[in-house]
Image (tube, rainbow, N blue to C red):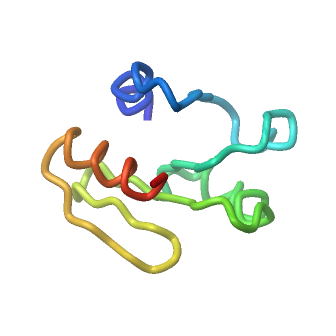
Amino acid sequence: MAGLATSLVDKPDLCIFLGNLQNLDDLPVPDLIIADLSDSETVRALPALCSHPGIPLLSVNAATSTLTIISGESHDINSIQELISLISKILG
C-alpha cells in the first residue's frame, strides 16, 4: 500500500492518507478507499469501511495482481500504470 501511495502522491487531484483503518472517522471523508483485503487489519475494519456508503472501496492484491472494486468488478493489472489508469477512470 505504501508503494501505491507513493505512486499516486504526484496526482494533483488526490490527497493520500495512510494509516490505521480503525480510525476512519478521524480523517476527512474520502473520495475513494483503497485497501488490501488480504491484510487482517483490513478485514477487521470492513464494517467501518462499509459504513461509508457512496465511497468506492477498492481492494488491491499484489500477490495476484488484481484490483477488485467491491461493487463486484475485478480487473487484472500488470503494472502500476494500469492500476493508476483504472483508479483515474473510477474517479472520473
92 or 19, nearer to the observer:
92
Left or right of residue 23, residue 45 in this image: left
Compared with 19, 33 (above or below) is below
Compared with 27, 51 (above or below) is below
Residue 43 sits in quarter: bottom right
Compared with 89, 4 (above or below) is above
Outermost residue to the front: 92
- Measured from the top left, where is residue 30 in percent x and y? 69, 44
Left or right of residue 77, residue 14 in this image: right
Left or right of residue 24, residue 71 in this image: left
45 or 30, nearer to the observer:
30
Outermost residue to the bottom: 72
Which quadrant of the rendered structure holds the N terminus? top left
What residue do we see at 56% from left, 60% from top?
Answer: 57
What residue do we see at 48% from left, 58% from top?
Answer: 58
Residue 45 sits in quarter: bottom right
- Give the mark count: 0
What residue do we see at 33% from left, 72% from top?
Answer: 74
- Measured from the top left, where is residue 37 in percent x and y? 50, 58
50 or 54, nearer to the observer:
54
What residue do we see at 70% from left, 66% from top?
Answer: 54
Residue 68 sits in quarter: bottom left
10 or 39, nearer to the observer:
10
- Measured from the top left, where is residue 33 in percent x and y? 59, 49
Outermost residue to the left: 78
